[in-house]
Amino acid sequence: MRNGSCEFVLDDAAAGPDELVAAALEPGSDVSWADGGPVRTCRRAWLDTFDWRLYRAGLTLEQVSGRGFADLTLTGRDGEVLATERIGAGASGVRWPSLLSGLPSGPLRELLEPVVGVRALAPVARATSRIDERRALNAEAKTVARLAVDRMSVTFPARAVVPPRLSLAPVRGYQGQADRLGHALAHVLGISSGSGSALDAALAAAGRRPADRGGKGAEVQLTPAMPAPVAMVAILDALVDTIEDNVTGAVRDIDTEFLHDLRVAVRRTRSALKLAGHCLPVGLARRFRPEFRWLGDLTTPTRDLDVYLLSLPGMIAGLVAASEADLVPLRDYLARSRAAAHRDLARGLRSARFARLIREWRTELAAVRPSRKDQTVARLADGRITAANRNVLRTGRLITAASPPADLHELRKRCKELRYMLELFGSLHDPARRWQAVRELKALQDCLGEFQDAQIEREEIGVFAERMLAERSATAATLLAMGEIAAGLARRQRHARSVFDLRFADFAGPASQARLAALARTAAA
Amino acid sequence: MKIFATYNIKGGVGKTSTAVNLGYLAARDGFRVLLWDLDPQGAASFLFRIKPKVKGGGKAIISGARAIDAAIKGTDYDNLDLLPADFTYRNLDLLLDSAKRPERKLARLIDPLKAEYDLVFLDCPPSISLLSESVLHAADVLLVPLIPTTLSVRTLDQLAEFVAGFNGHRPEVLAFFSMIDRRKRLHLQVSAELPESRAGFATTAIPALSLIEQMSVRRAPITAFAPRSIGARRYADLWREARQRAGL
């Protein structure tokens, strides 16, 4: 049932629906079928982010295009229409993939914003539908329900024909009669009740499943008794899949999350090699760690500028003396610098060095074989989580009021390593316990992140100012506005530093440490 | 949400035909339209092939025992719904009389529908009563069909005077000639003279045509079954004027 309507599928793709539909009418019934007008043809595209954020949130965004128009419709889990927006068709329409800023302002965009965020929307399936409508009339020849016969041909992600789908929609106030008709249709041989959406049907026909990939990669399912090398290969395979999945989007610059997710996968790979590389064949981790470091460094300039550009609206909103117009030269400068950085990034991701890294890494992972004396992954996870936790505690306890920012940055890196270990081996732990165990760690990471980001952004804004002065693209008003931003960053950093002791004490305290120790033990048990 | 009402103290002047056709044209223009058939004779309901019956009758609607939207029926046309007539509507005056501030009651009943509909058309029974007063208070535009006779002039003057006495919200009055018979000298004379002496008179006039009468046989708006006919074109002209008057 969707919007009070009933959905059916014809079992035979080649079957004509007319005889089947006629069979639903009981002898002597006062309901009859009438033609519902000419056959309509429309092009359909279902849109989602690369990591299926809409689908995972129970939302479906569909674009239906006809002659000279295109309508975007957002529906909820039970098919209810949440918002619609008419956009131009063809050249005047939205070119996909598109960020939300490419959509007209209005209720649809407002509903999408919290779910889609900075990601771009792109078609996940395309199809052409030929819709033939019939009307069910009562004894007064009044329409009580409409039956749409939808013959859909999928054109993307693969060509396929979907068995005809029937949708019986009641006219308002005639739900009872429509329900009786729907019940009768469900009992006709050759017609089956269908519950899936048109998107599900299109993807199934094309041999795809929705939400079959996530941005940061799906959690690898491990079992405690698995030999450690086997588990490590599974983890590293999933990470290299994520790296490769995100390369095209990062090179084509579809949205900033492709690069972010690629970087996270690289950092996780590096942490896994550093902390658990010893259970791989001798020399493997040592050989590949410098190459993954190169890959990580390759992505840094673009990502740093992405972060700056993404946080700029927030910085502008916090301005007291300066105005947004004063910062237009800074935004232009950042955009130019980012374009240059992205060119270098794209060159690196298309390079023979990157292709060789991925190819050789996959070959080496495929060649890893377990031996009898391997420890289990549960024991490995226990040991690595314990060691990473010990590193955090040791580094953190050395920090005093006089410690330089670099020491806090070191601690942040140790925290990230611990977090990655908890995530990579996450499937060995009870999700609720894991969430509780990382609570204090997360709060500490947030504090360190805020401190470090403010530090870097402060340093960078000074560099930007010097370069803009050198190239004469900054006015006095711009430099003053940048000074105001730098002051705001300094305030943010001071605040983060003032709560650090408390956050670290919470993390290092007995309750938090007991939860972490218990988590490590459950995996080993 | 804008509310249009077709009103005249006299019966058989084309109120229902106007409500049905303008409602259909508004829906075709993309507005979400509700037509409320307030006439217990149920002519508008009949034209849309909908049973003139509301569960609990007028009492349930006026008292609020039955939510108004639960009684709404979809017509055969996109964007056009109907709140059917009910024979108990003949007692709406009595029911309104017992309500608090009866002249505002209809507006209060319609108000919750503003999220769902852009336009409401009220098809009034021919009377001067508490119900018609409530309709006049609720409406933004009063569509007043007049048969071109001397008595019609008096009716229009009385209505204009009555509306002018309202405090606060006053509907726009859009009077127009209906059922003009070009063979009748009086019709031609009055329809030529009256618009010149009265402000706000519509330039469109609806002729008396057998095709318009055919609506009750075909049970559909003329604008739907004969969209290129003269009658349909005149209703389209009238709708354009009504839209303009409502600021749409």
Image (cartoon, coloured by chain):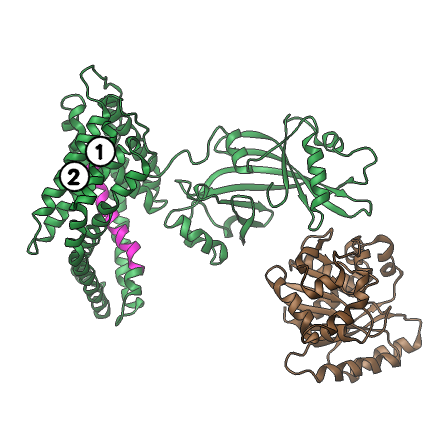
Q: Residue at the spot x=66%, y=66% of the render?
A: B109
Magenta-span inclusion, residue B112:
no
Three-letter amino acid code of the residue under disc 1: Ala
Q: Chain A is drawn in which colour?
A: green
Q: Which quadrant of the rendered structure holds the C terminus of chain A?
A: top left
Magenta residue span: A294-313
Q: Mark 2 lies on which chain?
A: A
Q: In this view, does A52 lie to the left or right of A518?
A: right
Q: Is residue A239 left or right of residue A471?
A: right
Which chain is depicted brown?
B
Q: To which residue does mark 1 refer?
A: A520
Magenta-span inclusion, residue A296:
yes
The residue at the far top in this view is A372
Q: In this view, does A201 lie to the left or right of B164?
A: left
Q: In the depicted view, which residue is nearer to us: A460 or A198? A: A198
Three-letter amino acid code of the residue under disc 2: Asn
Q: Which quadrant of the rendered structure holds the N terminus of chain A?
A: top right
Would residue B45 be visible to someone looking at this image?
A: yes
Mark 2 element type: helix
Residue A461, position as x, y percentages in the image: 19, 59
Category of crowding for the residue at label 1, using alpha-carbon neighbours closer than 10 angstroms: few (below 14), some (14–19), many (at least 20): many
- Asked if badges 1 and 2 are on one and the same chain, I answer yes
Q: To which residue does mark 2 refer?
A: A389
> Residue A524 occupies which quadrant of the picture?
top left
Q: Which chain carries label 1?
A: A
Q: Are marks 1 and 2 in contact (CB under 8 Å)?
A: yes
Residue B122, position as x, y percentages in the image: 73, 66
